[in-house]
Amino acid sequence: MSDKPFCDFVYEAIVDIEDVQSLGQSPTGQRFIVNILGGEFNGPLLQGKVLPGGADRQLLRPDGIKELDALYEIQTDDGAFITVHNQVIIDMHSSHQRYARSVVKFLAPTGKYEWLNRRVFVGDLESQQPTRNAVKIRVFQVN
């Protein structure tokens, strides 16, 4: 068995968002969209800004679970553009605290950041309201 930890910290992002907009009811639940306005991210191996223009599509299921499906781009401080696809499950009715965990996938260009295409990543999500209309996302690489 390896002494390496199960996960390594990759970065923390603060993502500024618009207010939630309802898209109406569907057979599987209430639909919403949240537009991404920008932000920043910092970590030991990459840092930079979150680009505006992405969106987080949300589904509030009949059982009270919220599914988020966010797709957006980040730009590293050295100019690389990376697409982020973050799929989140939020359980507001967890016994002790809000449960918000995700699977994060990257599409990075060939070169310095292509390692992002070759690993599994997980994350957590925390609202920054009421101080800022944003979410904090922490991303970890599964070893």
Image (cartoon, rainbow, N blue to C red):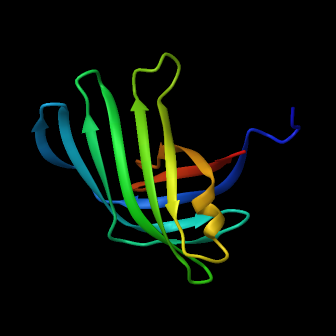
Q: Which image quadrant: the C terminus?
A: top right
* Residue located at (67% from left, 56% from top): 10
Give how far across and how far down residue 130 sits, in percent.
40, 48
Residue 96 horizontal side relative to residue 59, left or right: right
Residue 41 position by quadrant: bottom right
* Residue located at (66% from left, 69% from top): 46
> Relative to the observer, which residue lies in front, 105 or 98?
105
Residue 6 position by quadrant: top right
Give how far across and how far down residue 88 sits, in percent.
43, 41
Which residue is at the far bottom?
79
Q: Is residue 20 visible?
A: no
Give how far across and how far down residue 68 sits, in percent.
35, 44
* Residue located at (47% from left, 29% from top): 98
Q: Is residue 127 visible?
A: yes
Residue 79 horizontal side relative to residue 90, left or right: right
Residue 93 horizontal side relative to residue 106, left or right: left
Q: Is residue 67 above or below residue 18?
A: above
Which residue is at the far top?
95
* Residue located at (46% from left, 49% from top): 128
Q: Which image quadrant: the N terminus?
A: top right
Residue 26 horizontal side relative to residue 36, left or right: left
Give how far across and how far down residue 117 sits, in percent.
58, 61
Q: Is residue 97 above or below residue 141?
A: above
| Total count of labels | 0
